[in-house]
Image (cartoon, grey):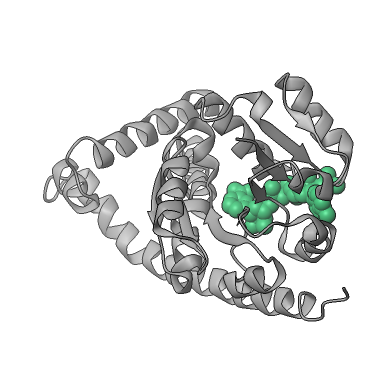
Amino acid sequence: MKIGFIGTGSMGRTLVEAFIHAQTFLPSEIVISNRTQKTADQLAAAYPGIQVAHNNLELVQQVSCFFICVKPGEFRQVFEDILPGIKADQLAISITSPVMLEDLEKWLPCKVAKIIPSITNQVLCGSSLYIPGSRITPKEEQWLHQLLSTISNPLKVDERHTRISSDLASCAPAFLANILEQMVEAAVKKTGIPPETAAPLVAQMALGVGKLLTEGGFSLHSLQQRVSVPGGITAEGLELLEQELSPAFDKLFHITHAKYEEDVEKVKRSLQYRSI
Ligand SMILES: NC(=O)c1ccc[n+]([C@@H]2O[C@H](COP(=O)([O-])OP(=O)(O)OC[C@H]3O[C@@H](n4cnc5c(N)ncnc54)[C@H](OP(=O)(O)O)[C@@H]3O)[C@@H](O)[C@H]2O)c1
């Protein structure tokens, strides 16, 4: 089976590399295309065997399943490129949340699904979200689940919950890294500890916390209870975080949802009129 990736920017490249490292696909089973071909050529040079298609149409004519890894405003061009080559039994997988399944199905006369990968999939960790389209059979859904499980923990979500699930699985690595960075900066400012000592401390701590929560039998709550002694230093710190962080997260989700709704509207408008 040949698998395609349209768009080899940050996330397209991450997915290609993750599937190769997980041995889901051999490089020779992968076909890629990118608007600027040099970027695709560089990825192919790193993994001999990957085939670079000269354009998106050439790519879809060679694969049974392909990922669309471009930004929301770039979808229309991709649709117009590939439409003449699409076959009903092909599977098109979009990795972009504001492009609705309804629009994917309107434009593409094939099976479609939406997935939301995460940068954590680069190290074959973290979640991926998937939302199968209406033309996908239970067997194909099972195949998609299995495919994603080679690089992540797949979770089927309702399209209505795409934004919040993406915030938690896909944006949160950046949010968490920001919180940890601010923690390191405050530690450096307060005590003069060298950043190169403090940064690995929080990185190893985050790795350990992830393991405790996924393999160590802890919940978010029980972990806090276990570390803090009533009246102790950690308990004081937790009290402060409750007060300060909770309103920040309310605002954060307000912002991500407002931006999402704006993007959905923009994409709907850009996909409205079929020129072909
Ligand atoms: N980054 C994340 O962690 C993450 C996680 C989940 C989902 N996503 C979603 O993934 C999508 C892509 O994000 P990204 O960070 O990978 O963006 P990116 O780095 O800008 O990559 C987009 C790629 O698409 C290529 N492209 C644009 N139009 C094209 C066309 N008509 N035909 C072929 N290739 C085309 C671009 O080529 P050029 O080289 O010419 O610019 C670029 O390499 C976004 O919608 C984002 O929301 C991202």
Residue at 47% x, 41% y is: 147
Q: Work out whether residue 4 or residue 71 is closer to the camera in this orientation and state it.
A: 4
Is residue 43 shown left or right of residue 275?
left
Observer able to see residue 244: yes
* Residue 234 image-quadrant placement: top left
Q: Position of residue 245 (x, y in %)?
A: 39, 62
Residue at 59% x, 64% y is: 97
Q: Quadrant of the N terminus?
A: top right
Q: Position of residue 64 (x, y in %)?
A: 64, 45
Residue at 23% x, 35% y is: 215
* Residue 256 image-quadrant placement: bottom right
* Residue 141 image-quadrant placement: bottom left
> Height in image: 149 above or below 77?
above
Query: Residue extending furthest left?
Result: 230
Is residue 171 shown left or right of residue 234?
right
Residue at 64% x, 62% y is: 110
Is residue 74 shown left or right of residue 161?
right
Observer able to see residue 192: no
Q: Position of residue 229 (x, y in %)?
A: 12, 45
Q: Quadrant of the C terminus?
A: bottom right
